[in-house]
């Protein structure tokens, strides 16, 4: 075998083909892996744009075995390992080619096509420089050949859409020079180790050895070994007194986190957790001959370990004010604030500030994240912002600012994705955005908890014991009395249903309550009685209203906006542009860019996604015909909008219906697109990474489900019998009993419509729990949860999901669109009335497939 370091452009140079053999699994990378690779690329792009020579980023290795030389002298290689990386880069270049074409840069597009993607003088499959496994070929060829189905469902289409969206958005904000830098990085700055086998080598044995390696040393293990190699005299005492107590206190994961944070707070805002050892080793090498200095480094880490534990477990912090801010951020979740918090605790313990200053400075981090939640800003970029913050804060302190002002000024600087919404932006968002669809459920809860605490009740609520949830006052599924009330406030060309959609998920209509079941969708008079007896001041104020409609919801939103300005102070004046584009329009563009070929959506679905009115979306799309995918936005009945126009220069393009049909969207005789191919707001949210938008997963761990299962099961059955025909109800219940006979269990959702999830625990581990469908008894639908299955073995194999879809589509009454293979398509529960036996066969196959002994699977070669 021979190994050499190379770049992607050199690897694919010349007449060559990389063929993925049949024993390899299909392409598996999804958004997380793609985002990690893209973040690495963006760091190199920033270096290049700042005239810093970017250091090559090590992407990983590929193992190749020579195959026969094809006609015309083309060399074919079998990809023994590394197909995920090669496929990903090929798709990135395919998207880059198409981004050039969209901007009229034909020569640049042709160069990529000819030099990277295809062998111009070869025919058939030999034409393609990469030939994936048979299951992936059709989707891959569609992208390379720019067929109408390019960017369809599945991981291949998803990766192509990811890169095309990232390139389109990037060029809109940073210009063509940014695109040139991206192309340069993809070509020449992604380092790959190419390992080539000699003829006669057993490639199957090579493959097996690569994918059956033992557990390697962690980054902190490597650092420990390096340090103590240079502590021959002091090592035993240093290990016993400093390293071992630190290691036992933190545990392996937190120790690795500490070593990474040590780099970040030290000013290395590009440090990666995967490269901790390399970066720390480089920093420590000048001290390798000085045992005293190395001991001081370990001692410094030991001290910082105690500070990290105060961040992770805020009860350890002695000062009440600072502890309160740390607790709120801990409940918010994630590690985004850790670099700033560690910097502040460093300064506090070193006597450079007092606890009140540190608490004030840290509260700006909380405000930054909460205001972005209100405004619907993506969390993408937050980690980068807070990694850069320690270095920026130190500069502000050198300029004479106080600690709080230094943090506030640094966060106020609007650069790239760093936007701290102003008071005006926050007020508008609170009034109009569907807050119930923003962020994570526990973050929405924390915001409402903070509002409640701001009323200063004489007897504070014990949140640890109170079983409170976020509830709607105007119900999600209102009875007719509610629509009658809303009808009194509707404007011209506005229906009560439109007004309900506009108001129901906004902050002004939300509160906290432990009376979920009692509140339900009762008329306001009944809800008043329940809310008035609540210990929460928020609920008492709502109960004091005479009615609950548009005026009251907007008035409460205005009151909460004023409180929000006090609780979460905003950026410094003059730093955020007053004319900054509303974040919702960027979210709309991302949604259109991520729509798979063969799907359509409506103005109303887009409006629900971004938190505005369908009319505003229609006006925005109508005045911007150059929006990518605008032809996929149809009216609510599935018809093409009469006002649709192609952008200037494309007037000769075919009717949008013909384009959609070529992508796979069927139309009926009245010109309506088939509803099974429509993407709802929840579908769009999943495509852009907002996985918790209007999505309900199994609510409880198995033990908790067993304790409350009888009650939940009874609610589910009652809703099912009240809303469906007797035949449908019996078919569903009989199928659920059959599922339990197969060894499955039943879990239930927490929302007013008690959904049911047939669960299967594989290997006894909750991490391997699967559920094929979610059943909704009142709305009468069964959702097939491909969106969740794609992340869970064995259904992370795309071919198995396609098999499941095909089996379901073989049942009369089920029509799942292939374009929704990565989402949550649904079929009516009434199918259970006449075809329960056929559905049970599908479920039997599902269980059999999920519980087979796990076959040997090739590596997914995750990004380095």
Image: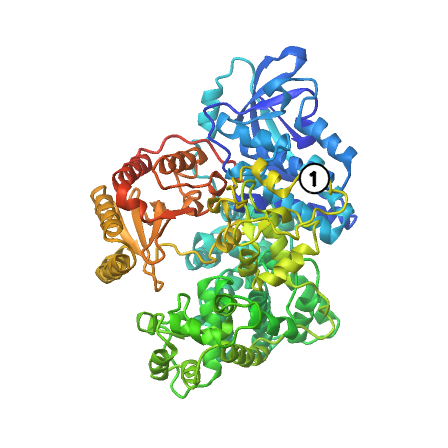
The residue singled out by tag 1 in the image is 653
620 sits to left or right of 601: right
Return the x and y of residue 33 as percentages of the image width and height.
54, 43
Residue shown at 34% from the left, 61% from the top: 753
Q: Is residue 265 above or below residue 99?
A: below
Specify the quadrant that holds the N terminus.
Answer: top right
Q: Is residue 126 above or below residue 770?
A: above
Q: Is residue 518 above or below residue 34?
A: below
Q: Is residue 271 visible?
A: no
Q: Is residue 317 above or below residue 417?
A: below
The residue most toward the front is 670
- For label 1, the crowd category at 10 Å Cα-Cα, with few meaning under 14, some 14 to 19 and many 20 or more, is few
Residue shown at 54% from the left, 47% from the top: 223
Residue shown at 76% from the left, 49% from the top: 175
Element carrying mark 1: loop
240 sits to left or right of 158: left
The residue most toward the top is 71
Return the x and y of residue 97 as percentages of the image width and height.
70, 36
Return the x and y of residue 488 as percentages of the image width and height.
49, 77
Query: In which image quadrant can residue 760 be found?
Result: top left
Which is more toward the observer, 170 or 675?
675
The residue most toward the bottom is 458
Color theme of the render:
rainbow
């Amino acid at each position: 075998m021979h190994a050499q370091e190379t770049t992607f452009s050199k690897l694919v140079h010349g007449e060559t083909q990389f063929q993925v053999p049949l024993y390899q699994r299909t392409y598996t990378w999804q958004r997380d892996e793609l985002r990690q690779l893209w973040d690495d690329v963006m760091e190199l792009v920033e270096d290049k744009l700042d005239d810093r020579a970017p250091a090559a980023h090590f992407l990983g290795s590929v193992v190749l075995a020579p195959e026969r030389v094809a006609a015309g002298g083309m060399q074919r290689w079998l990809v023994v390992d590394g197909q995920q990386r090669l496929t990903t880069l090929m798709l990135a270049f395919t998207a880059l080619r198409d981004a050039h074409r969209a901007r009229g840069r034909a020569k640049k597009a042709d160069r990529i096509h000819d030099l990277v993607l295809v062998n111009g003088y070869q025919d058939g499959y030999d034409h393609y420089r990469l030939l994936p496994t048979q299951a992936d070929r059709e989707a891959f060829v569609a992208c390379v050949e720019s067929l109408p189905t390019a960017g369809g469902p599945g991981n291949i289409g998803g990766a192509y859409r990811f890169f095309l969206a990232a390139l389109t958005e990037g060029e809109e904000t940073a210009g063509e020079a940014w695109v040139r830098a991206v192309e340069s990085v993809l070509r020449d700055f992604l380092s790959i180790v190419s390992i080539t086998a000699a003829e006669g080598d057993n490639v199957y044995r090579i493959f097996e050895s690569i994918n059956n390696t033992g557990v390697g040393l962690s980054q902190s293990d490597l650092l420990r070994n390096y340090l103590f190699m240079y502590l021959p005299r002091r090592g035993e005492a240093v290990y016993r007194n400093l390293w071992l107590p630190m290691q036992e206190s933190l545990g392996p994961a937190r120790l690795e986190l500490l070593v990474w944070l040590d780099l970040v707070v030290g000013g290395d805002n590009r440090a990666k957790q995967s490269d901790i050892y390399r970066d720390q080793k480089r920093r420590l090498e000048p001290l390798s001959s000085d045992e005293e200095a190395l001991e001081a480094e370990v001692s410094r880490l030991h001290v910082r370990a105690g500070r990290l534990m105060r961040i992770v477990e805020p009860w350890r912090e002695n000062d009440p004010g600072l502890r309160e801010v740390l607790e709120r951020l801990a409940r918010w979740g994630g590690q985004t604030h850790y670099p700033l918090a560690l910097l502040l605790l460093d300064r506090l313990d070193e006597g450079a500030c007092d606890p009140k200053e540190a608490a004030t400075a840290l509260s700006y981090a909380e405000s930054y994240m909460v205001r972005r939640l209100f405004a619907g800003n993506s969390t993408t970029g937050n980690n980068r912002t807070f990694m850069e913050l320690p270095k920026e804060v130190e500069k502000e302190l050198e300029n004479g600012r106080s600690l709080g002002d230094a943090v506030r000024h640094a966060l106020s600087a609007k650069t790239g994705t760093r936007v701290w919404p102003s008071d005006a932006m926050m007020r508008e968002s609170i009034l109009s955005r569907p807050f119930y669809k923003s962020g994570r459920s526990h973050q929405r809860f924390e915001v409402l908890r903070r509002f409640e605490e701001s009323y200063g009740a004489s007897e504070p609520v014990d949140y640890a014991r109170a079983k409170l949830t976020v509830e709607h006052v105007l119900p999600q599924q209102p009875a007719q009395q509610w629509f009658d009330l809303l009808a009194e406030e509707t404007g011209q060309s506005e229906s009560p249903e439109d007004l309900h959609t506009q108001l129901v998920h906004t902050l002004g209509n939300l509160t906290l309550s432990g009376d979920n079941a009692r509140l339900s969708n009762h008329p306001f008079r009944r809800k008043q009685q329940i809310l008035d007896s609540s210990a929460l001041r928020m609920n008492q104020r709502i109960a004091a209203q005479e009615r609950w409609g548009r005026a009251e919801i907007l008035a409460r939103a205005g009151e909460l906006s004023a409180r929000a300005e006090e609780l979460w102070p905003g950026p410094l004046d003059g730093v955020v542009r007053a004319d900054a584009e509303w974040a919702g329009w960027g979210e709309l563009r991302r949604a259109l860019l991520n729509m798979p070929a063969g799907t359509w959506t409506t103005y109303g679905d887009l409006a629900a996604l971004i938190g505005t009115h369908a009319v505003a979306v229609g006006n925005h799309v109508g005045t911007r015909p150059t929006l990518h995918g605008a032809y996929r936005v149809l009216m609510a009945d599935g018809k093409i909008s009469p006002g649709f126009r192609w952008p200037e220069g494309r007037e000769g393009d075919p009717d949008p219906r013909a384009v959609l049909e070529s992508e796979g969207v069927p139309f009926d005789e009245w010109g309506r697109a088939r509803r099974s191919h429509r993407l709802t707001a929840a579908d769009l949210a999943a495509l852009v990474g907002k996985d918790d938008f209007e999505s309900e997963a199994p609510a409880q761990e198995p033990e908790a489900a067993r304790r409350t299962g009888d009650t939940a099961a009874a609610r589910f059955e009652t809703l099912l019998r009240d809303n469906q025909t007797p035949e449908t109800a019996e078919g569903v219940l009989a199928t659920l009993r059959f599922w339990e006979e197969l060894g499955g269990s039943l879990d239930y959702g927490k929302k007013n419509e008690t959904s049911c999830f047939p669960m299967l625990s594989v290997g006894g581990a909750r991490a391997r729990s699967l559920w094929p469908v979610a059943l909704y008894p009142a709305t009468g639908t069964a959702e097939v949860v491909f969106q969740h299955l794609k992340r869970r073995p064995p259904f992370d194999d795309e071919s198995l999901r396609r098999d499941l879809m095909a089996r379901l589509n073989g049942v009369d009454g089920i029509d799942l669109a292939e374009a929704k293979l990565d989402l949550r398509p649904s079929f009516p529960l009434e199918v259970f009335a006449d075809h329960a036996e056929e559905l049970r066969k599908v479920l039997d196959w599902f269980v059999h497939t999920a519980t087979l002994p796990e076959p040997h699977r090739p590596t997914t070669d995750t990004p380095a």
